[in-house]
Image: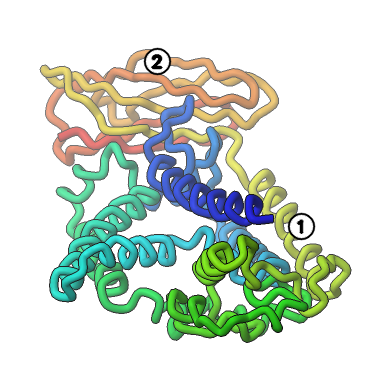
Amino acid sequence: MIANSVLRGKIYRLLQFIVVACVFIIPFIKTSNGNSLFRFDVATLQLFAFNGIVNFASFFSAFIAILLVTFLFIFTTQLLGRIWCGWLCPQSFFAIRIESYAKKFKNKTIRFIAELIFAAIFSLLLTVIWMMYFVSPYDFIETLKNSHLMLIIGIVLFLFIFVDFAFVRFKWCKYVCPYSKFQVVMTDDDTLYVGMIPGKDSQCIDCKACIRVCPTHIDPRKNPDADCIYCETCVTACNQVFHKKDNTNGILGYVWGKSDKLNLKRPNLIVTFIISVTLFFVLIYSIVSTSEPVMINTVGNISSLGNGVYTCNVEIKNNLDKPVRIKFINPDNLAEITPETVRVYIQSTKTETITINTKGEIPSGVLTIEAYYDRNTPPLKFDVNIK
């Protein structure tokens, strides 16, 4: 039993670091089409996900996607309570690290300064990585240089996170976070919680170690408490006390509601699950039914070869059940484009490097390119910035 408790604690901490590492790495991972593994591009209103492109220009698709995420959160909370808060939430993860790292300094003034430094470092890291989920990380610096709006958004986001990490931390979880407020009405008597294991009340030695280490300053022995964020800090402290006392596990742990039994036959859980599954299939249908037969996007920045010659990567996605041959032209006859035609196979995505040879200076600095793939359909148009 002791080994299982220690193992769960190690898995808990390892999972947190793995999740945070994935959050920081995912925007930098490129798929075969040259896009991020997972990123919502604000410029094109497209979601890049696992080598696919989801066009959210349709309000209906975006609305269904938001509803789906909402109901998945409700379903998870009904079943597992605030497991998100303790295991996966960046707010909890970094707040715990700031306090644990700063506690190593005994002097209160130095400890406070350390908290501010750690808060600033973590705030900067989170600000940059969150923005990279909306702007390509490989164009991030260039975007900040050219867009005052993005720079202002970054500064505001950094200041908001810094104030939170430096001065608010777990007060946010207890008093501000809307998810914690919704959790009160979404849970029931069968929801998983962290607290006193049934039947072990009499074993409590009233050492209050669990209360002293709790980041939200609650008494974990009072079951259940809506302010608990499932961080397991109290469980670890209780285990340490009992390990020293008689080499046994503590009296706190994960409990499946008042009966301490997993119950999946709950009406609210079943209804939420059915709604989530329905929304998932509606979203898939809306995306498939409204997706363009052929989609073309530029990837990355345009490169100049000198003498009015430029290169640009173009991503072509063919959603048709037949191969297509794309023909590129400039309708204003201001440039020659090679290769003139590109073949894309059935239901596939291809990234092609095109060369643009301008015949003179482009007054606006923007060159319009038309792509034809069918005589009976209007051409697809996209602009290339030539500066």
Residue indicated by mark 1: 277
- Report x, y in % for residue 19: 48, 49
Ranked by sequence position, the earlier of labels 2 and 1 is 1
Q: Is residue 231 left or right of residue 21?
A: right
Residue tagged by mark 2? 340
- Residue shown at 31%/35% (left/top)? 368
Q: Identify the element where label 1 is drawn.
A: helix
Q: Is residue 340 visible?
A: yes
For residue 202, above or below residue 127: below
Query: Label 1 amino acid?
Result: Val
265 lies above or below 31: below
- Kindly identify which numbered label has been placed on residue 238: none
The answer to whether residue 84 is visible is: no
51 left or right, relative to 67: left
Q: Amino acid at mark 2?
A: Glu
Q: Residue at x 48, y 43 (%)?
A: 38
Residue visible at 50% across and 47% down? Answer: 14
**Residue 111 falls in image quadrant:** bottom left
